[in-house]
Image: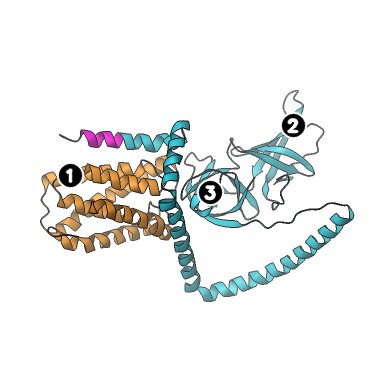
Chain colours: A orange, B cyan
Amino acid sequence: MRFYLLAVLLAYFQSSVLMIFFQSFLFAPNLLLAYLFFELMREKGYGLKKATFSGLSLDLLQDSLGLHLFSHTLFTMAVNAMKSRFELLNRSSLLLAYVPLSLMERLCLFALFRLKYFSEFKPGLTLLGFLLEFIFLLIISRWYPKGEV
Amino acid sequence: MKGQGPAFLLLSLSLLLYFSNPSTLPYVNKAYNFLRLMVRIIFFELKGLVVESTRKALETYVLLSRVGEENRRLRGQLEECAIYRTQLQTCETNLLHISKLIELTPELKHYPLLYASVIAYDPSGNDTFLIVNRGQGAGLKEGMVVFHGDNLVGILDRVYGGSSRVRTVFSQEFSISALLGDKAYIYRGGHPYGSLLHVNLEDEVKVGDVVFLRVPGKNFPQLTIGTVHSVYQEGKSFFKRVEVRPAVDIRRLSLCIVIKEEL
């Protein structure tokens, strides 16, 4: 239950505060994705329910029905594929694993958005958004692999 | 791959949702609007308030961080505007005076304006629509006029929670009342040229004439739609074919203004 409450709060914060600073959800830090990753890495199940809930929350709040749902589901599938092959025992490996997965999710989101609309790619803002997202994961990963958030 | 069936199903469903725009379908639209209404106060109105407060805070910060140079530049512009305003007030007074003499009572009204940033463009290259970052949360409604400088950009045709779609003057689905000289016509959008409909053969229309927006019964600012690009006769038609080049450059647009008044 804690995940769902925090997910709604994070989605709300992202959609109403961070999006203003970053102009578009394409460049804004996806804190919810970082939190989803953290939760997926701690649990043993597949985590599809959490991915669906977090994706839909963002879709509802950012008027992008289906877009975040797709990227979060794909992200969860990639995380599960990684979990089945590697064991991330410490915090550094968790952070290292997050980088390619998150960048892949961003790329997917942007590519899908560009298929429907045109929007200029802003590398500076994207990098800043990703860095903030990474810092957020760095903070919450203090409780990895054991303990409570 | 084992056990990934639901995930693939969800992926396909989300792609379908994203590309099919189900919220525009008649029955789904009603259900979607009902759902939005249920959570409107908790989510969207509160979100609108938070978004507006954050935007104001950010604008204030940006303004304060370079306040020195901005001040000098703006002071010059303000002086210019003050002179124009004085001239405008004189014109208004004269207009009211003349209208009393000829027994007309024009209503002078100042409409509230709202600035919006463009967040997405039409990927087809035909510039038929724009997505702006203001929506129901900022009090926008379908049918409001969007402009930039003194050029008409388009009309809001879909308003979502935190964003809106602008149907531009380049879209073939866009048509509006226009003024050329002292005659009213219907302007229909198109890319790269729009057109004026039902222009009689005897009407004097020249290349380079300016076409303005016409809003009957409302005292809207005189926004430019475009200039006449070509005039020719098609076969034995009763009407001339008049092509209009829209004045606004959609691809360079990053900020536009919405008049918060429905047409």
Q: Which residue is mark 1?
A: A80
Discs 3/1, front = 1
Find residue B103 and name its label. Answer: none
- Chain of the residue that carries numbered disc 1 in the rendered image: A
Dot 2 alpha-carbon crowd within 10 angstroms: few under 14, some 14 to 19, many 20 or more: many
Whether residue B10 appears in magenta in the rendering, the answer is: yes
Task: Provide residue B160's location: percent of width, then percent of height.
Answer: 48, 46
Residue drawn at point x = 38 percent, y = 51 percent:
A26
| Residue stretch rendered in magenta on the structure | B5-12
Total labels drawn: 3
Of the pair B260 and B229, the residue shown nearer to us: B260
Find residue B240 and name its label. Answer: 2
Residue drawn at point x = 36 percent, y = 55 percent:
A12
Q: Which residue is mark 3?
A: B251
Confirm or deny contact between disc 2 and disc 1 (CB under 8 A).
no
Q: Give the distance between the C-alpha atoms of the residues marked 3 and 1, in whole angstroms.
A: 42 Å
Label 3 amino acid?
Arg
Discs 2/1, front = 1
Q: Secondary structure at mark 3?
A: helix
Q: Give the distance between the C-alpha atoms of the residues marked 2 and 1, in whole angstroms.
A: 65 Å
Task: Provide residue B148's location: percent of width, then percent of height.
Answer: 60, 53
